[in-house]
Amino acid sequence: MESTTKLTCFLQLLIFSFLCQSLASSSFTIVDSNSTFPSEALPTKSGYLPINPNTNSAIFYTFYEAQSPGLPLSQTPLLIWLQGGPGCSSMIGNFFELGPYRVVDIQNENIQHLSLERNLGSWNRIFGLIFLDNPIGVGFSFAATPEEIPRDQHSVAKHLFAAITGFIGLDPDFKNRPLYITGESYAGKYVPAIGYYILKQNMRLPEGKQVNLKGVAIGNGLTDPITQVKTHAVNAYFSGFINERQKGELEEAQWKAVEFVKTGNWSEATNARSEALDLLQNMTGLATLYDFTKKAPYRTGLVTKFLQSADVKRKLGANESIVFDECSDAVGEALSEDVMKSVKYMVELLVKKSKVLLYQGHFDLRDGVVSTEAWVRTMKWEGIKRFLIAERKVWKVNGELAGYAQKWGSLSHVVVLGAGHLVPTDQALNSQAMIEDWVLDKGVFAYEKKRVSASDTRAVGDRELGFLGRFIPVELFDASSFLRIANTNIGI
């Protein structure tokens, strides 16, 4: 009996030693949400940026300096990331998508342990990266009163401008660094709104107080809802998810949203769009419309659990009294009448005064490729005809197919293969390569001098919509015309 006990103790020590060595040699840092945040995962700066001198309302931020900048820091680009929703926290982008560390879980004897894992595809490899919890009332940001929560994009932009200029004022070296504003989903409205606001402010401000905005990037964005909502049925039908009868039902639901927009009934338009998307969800039976290949929704709830830890809040400089939630119902409700309003006109100014990147994950059925291409073709921009006939290039990263890119002048469009709504989560390294090459005008984003004849530009009319290299008038965009084009191009 005594020898058995000694043998058992020896085996336990051996197993313990093995586990310790395994953890020490693992490729990620393990941090339980109840323990101290490791120093290497902490932001360079974090805290609050006041947006109103008369109240305590403030936007929470985390800033990560470039890990391996290729330029002096005073010249290194700064990226700002805005999450969608409306009303979702940019800490999702930080700790689940493109920040330097991601929250993961480790199951041990049916107990969930939350940990941080280094993200090799983070967007701060060679750029500075700022996450803003926007609007106030979202995530760790604070709204002094419910009435101060924005209800339109002008108010959103006004608050963001105060936060961004406040951040720039934290360090003299920030002043002249090139600034790029990025985001996804409902940030397809936030990003153009703040970009547009900056351009307008720069027109009246002295040079010393202007913001050095160079470009904006929108991933899987909702930007021109009245155009985008009309694409769901035809997209799902020709992707094989619904039949013709269901397509007709879904088109009826979509048109309800369109009609409410035309009459200015914004609340009902928002509700009608939600009902159309719910109908599509029920018809397809998919786990999530954000990625039709997934068997379960994105696990963003891991970030919520992690950030509810008092120790994590303390280390991030967040208000410990705030109960972190992934998305704010109060902010979502405040912006409910904003959902179906278009900001396309803001993008039209931005593409003239800066550069614009639109990218989508190929598996997204909500705000994917087809819905983006539909509104882009209606843009009022002198370069749109040339953009529409520009070469769509095969895009590779490290010799492997990553997607497709189309560019003319200041407008770039990228389809990211193997990704859904959250592109940086699904394709970390490819999204990193995309954003770096776009900012630096490299690879498929390099400027090329090409001559385009007048006959080429006449091939694309102001009111034409293209699919698979063929063009049809927007007014004639229906299933039968779409099918004839598809038959001609892919031999059905």
Image: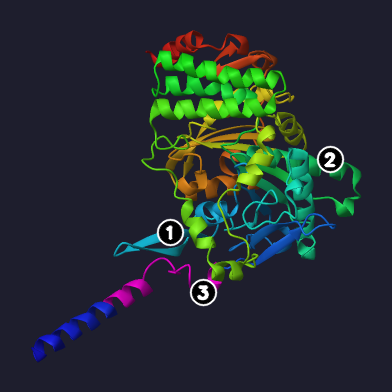
Q: Amino acid at mark 3?
A: Thr
Badge number at residue 36 = 3
Q: Which residue is mark 1?
A: 104
Residue at left offset 55%, top offset 45%: 434
Dots 2, 1 in contact, CB < 8 A: no
Quadrant location of the C terminus?
A: top left
Image location of residue 416, percent across then percent down: 49, 38
Nearer-the-camera pick, 348 or 332: 332
Q: Residue at x 74, y 59 (%)?
A: 49
Q: CA distance from mark 1 to mark 3?
A: 16 Å
Identify the disc placed on residue 59: none
Magenta part of the chain = 18-41
> At numbered mark 1, what does the secondary structure look like: helix, strand or loop?
strand
Q: Amino acid at mark 2?
A: Lys
In the image, farthest residue toward the bottom: 2
Is 376 one of the magenta-colored residues?
A: no
**Do residues under tags 1 and 3 come within 8 Å of each other at their CB atoms?**
no
Q: Name the residue beneath numbered marker 2.
A: 200
Of badges 2 and 1, nearer the viewer stands: 1
Quick check: 169 left or right of 395?
right
Mark 2 or mark 3: name the one nearer the start of the chain. 3
**Quadrant of the rendering where the N terminus is positioned:** bottom left
Q: Residues within 10 Å of mark 1 (few under 14, many from 20)?
A: many
- Say whether disc 2 or disc 1 marks the residue closer to the N-terminus: 1
In this image, 312 relative to 63: left or right? left
Are dots 2 and 3 in contact, CB under 8 Å? no
Mark 1 or 3, nearer chain start: 3
Q: Secondary structure at mark 3?
A: loop
Q: Residue flagged by tag 1: what amino acid is it?
A: Val
- Quadrant in which residue 123 is drawn: bottom right
